[in-house]
Structures are given as structure tokens and as C-alpha cells.
Amino acid sequence: MPDNNVELEAKSQGLHAKLYLSSQIILRASVISSTLAATWTLITAKQSVVIFGFTLDARYSYSSAFKFFAIANAVACGFCLLSVCFVFISTRQLALGSRQRNFFFFVHDLLMMGLVLSGCAAATAIGFVGRYGNTHTGWSPICDQFGKFCNRITISIAISYFAVLCLLILTIISANPTKLQR
């Protein structure tokens, strides 16, 4: 009987290791692809309209909040790409010990989540003013004239919030290691 328990425990640990590795890779790939897509959608968002004979342009680079949003997503994409490489290295026991590895992933994921979330918050605030205006300060909504631009910005922000969700899940996974990583 004791031999069967040892075999079952070994199979269980192998299954946990595969599940942990799979979840890390899938979630990190999701973060990489969504932050890259959000950055690309934002950077390529531009529109020109003619109003009363004047040509007006809308570009992400005209807003410091949108610039920060693009940079935050690009940085998160790059660091998550590096973390995928580290996942492969550390699972083969070539890197830090398991506690240090989990702490590294926890801090990395927490910082990336904070960065992307702050970029999303800044872009959401400016996007809200662009769509609805602010009557108290006299800011008029611009999305009536720049609909295509505003729609691309909205899509970019939504994609980036998906990356925040994936990073939150990664942070929770790294903060609560399974029996295998202890």
C-alpha cells in the first residue's frame, strides 16, 4: 500500500507542475498579446476631419495620458516576454529556488499589473472626457467629430483591461504557491 501512495503523490505533483507551467505560459502569453494589441491599436489610432474649412487631427500623441498608456503597455509587454523566458529557465531548475522564484514572479506580476492599471486609469479618464466632455470646465466632447479615433481608443483600453485581469490572476497564482513550489 505505501508504494501506491508514493506513486499517486508523485503523479499528483507532476500534474500540479504541468498545470502550474501551463497556466503561467498561457496567462503570460495572453498579457503579451493583449498589451501588444492595445499598444498597436492606440498608436495607429488617428483621424482627420474638416470643420468649417479647417483640418483638425486627433492622434494619441496629442495627449500625455495616451502616451503614458502606450508606454506602460509596451513596457509590460517587454517585461512579460522576459518573464516567459524566465518561466522556462526556472522550471528546469537552472534559476532561483522555488520560494525565490515565486517571490520574483509575484513582485514582477504585481509591478506590471500596477503599471498597466495606472495607464488604463489615465487613458480611461481622458477618454471619458473626450466622449462626454465636462460642462463644469467648458470641455466639449470630441467623439462626435472623431468617432473612428474614439472607438479605437476604447478598444485599446478594453484590451488593456483584459491584460490587467490576466496579471491579477498571475499575481494571485504567484502569491499562493501550490504544495509543489513550497
Image (cartoon, rainbow, N blue to C red):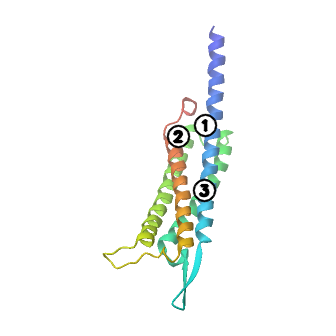
Looking at the figure, which quarter contains the N terminus? top right
Residue 154 is situated, as x and y percent measured from the top left of the image, at 52, 64
**Element assignment for label 3:** helix
**Element assignment for label 2:** helix
Q: How far apart are marks 2 and 1 (CA)?
A: 9 Å
Which residue is denoted by mark 3 in the rendering?
34
The circle on residue 20 is: 1
**Element assignment for label 1:** helix
- Of the two numbered discs 3 and 1 on the same chain, state the one appearing first in sequence: 1
Residue type at numbered disc 2: Ile
> Pointers 2 and 1 in contact (CB under 8 A)?
yes
Question: Crowding near pointer 1: few (<14 within 10 Å), some, many (20+)?
Answer: some
Residue at position x 66%, y 34% from top? 18
Q: Is residue 95 visible?
A: no
Residue at position x 53%, y 38% from top? 99
- Quarter holding residue 102: top right
Q: Distance between the residues labelled 2 and 3?
A: 19 Å
